[in-house]
Every structure is written in C-alpha cells, then in structure tokens.
Amino acid sequence: DIQMTQSPSSLSASVGDRVTINCRASQSISDYLNWYQLKPGKAPNLLIFGASSLQGGVPSRFSGSGSGTDFTLTISSLQPEDFATYFCQQTYSIPLTFGQGTKVEIK
Amino acid sequence: QVQLQESGPGLVKPSQTLSLTCTVSGGSINSDDHYWSWIRQFPGKGLEWIGHISSSGSTYYNPSLKSRLMMSVDTSKNQFSLKLSSVTAADTAVYYCARTLNKHADFWGQGTLVTVSS
C-alpha cells in the first residue's frame, strides 16, 4: 500500500493568513492526488483533484501543487469557513489511501 | 445537484453483518462515467477507502476488507449498498457514501455513525 504522510497534523492560524499543508507519498504517484475538506456533521468537500485542478464551486483561494511524491495544498487567505480538517488522498493504486489529516484551528 | 444519503442501523453487534444503503437523488446512478464509493472515518479521525462499484456491478475493494465485504447496486431504486460481515469494535466508524469520477469523490453523503457493540 502507498503511505501518505501529511504535515503538520494541526496548525493554528488567523483569518487572512496564508496556510500551507504538505502531503508526501511513499512512492511516486504522478499527479494522482486529491484534497478534501471535512467538517463535523457535514458532507466532505472535494477541493482539488489531479494535484492541481480546482473542483467546480471551490473558492480560488484554494490551490494545489506538486507531482511525484511531494504535494502542497495552499489557502492564500484563510477565511472563517475554512477552519476544518484537510486530507490528501492518492488514487494511483488500490487501495486508495489517505493522509492522516491536518486540523486547521483558529489562533 | 447530486445528493447522497446513507441509511442503516447505528448499532451492530460483534460478529454480525453491518448493512448500509446509499440513496442517490438529483442524478441517475446508471452512469458509465461514475463509480459509487464507500469511505469510513474512524473515531481517531483517520479515513479509509472501503471500495467502489459501477452501475453495472463492477467492484473494486480494499484488499484489507475484501474477505468480509460485499457491495451491490440497485439501479431501479437509485441506490447502492454495503455489507461488511464479522464486524468487530474496530469497524466502529462514520460511514460515508460518495459519487466517484475518475477516482475523485466529488459528492458525498453526510455520513452515518455505526457503532459495533454488544
């Protein structure tokens, strides 16, 4: 199985801050990398697919980059509704696997 | 807008079978472009991909669950289902269903908590 390692596991930030979350794969996965946002009691939300493609309806302050083994999710200016937990997922091979999550909290 | 809703028992006894159904609205499950997925989130917050199924019944399962897992689809009801046998406390989780396009899950249900306990 491909192991996905996210960092940091949590972070505290203020509204307006630029936030970066990292995800590393245990082997090359090309650009088969998705990012999701999870909030308690709500349906999870796909943010980025194919490492850098913004899902329709997702604000442009979210962006993704990377290829191979190292990937980044960036929130350019954190908004109150962005406080949530973020997960990366590789879809290069089965079983599809997720990172352990990054919780973004209010500073 | 596609919507998905999970349903099923919230409490299952150890060694029994966990059964969940996902009802799709706002779109047809009978699509050549989509797969229909199950994903779970453990109490410690980690996510696990369980598997997915096409409208024609082709399945892809997580190998770690394959021996206990069965997925099915009912296109007449616009539903798909999950059965996980011989459950233990380790199967306690929030179970999500999702629509999958090219392996990214673009629409999800809100999830349903299933607790395995006697």
Image (spheres, rainbow, N blue to C red):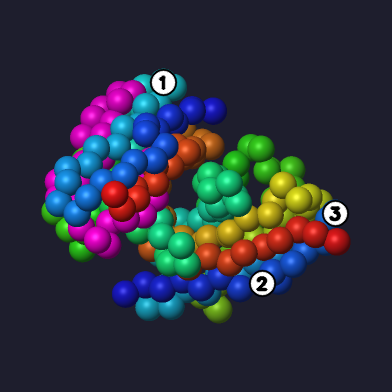
What is the CA distance from the residue labelled 1 to the residue labelled 3?
36 Å
Chain of the residue that carries numbered disc 1 in the rendered image: A
Question: Which of B89/A18 is in front?
Answer: A18
B46 lies left or right of B82: left
Dot 3 amino acid type: Ser
**Quarter placement of the C terminus of chain B:** bottom right
In the rendering, which numbered label is found on residue A27? 1
Mark 1 Cα shell of 10 Å, populated few (<14), some (14-19), many (≥20)? some
- Residue underneath mark 2: B8
B18 lies left or right of B93: right
Residue plotted at (58% across, 46% down) = B44
Kind of element beneath mark 2: loop
Same subunit, labels 2 and 1: the answer reads: no
Q: Earlier in the sequence, mark 3 or mark 2?
A: 2
Kind of element beneath mark 1: loop
Same subunit, labels 3 and 2: the answer reads: yes
Question: Which of B77/A41 is in front?
Answer: A41
What is the CA distance from the residue labelled 2 to the residue labelled 1?
38 Å
- Residue underneath mark 3: B15
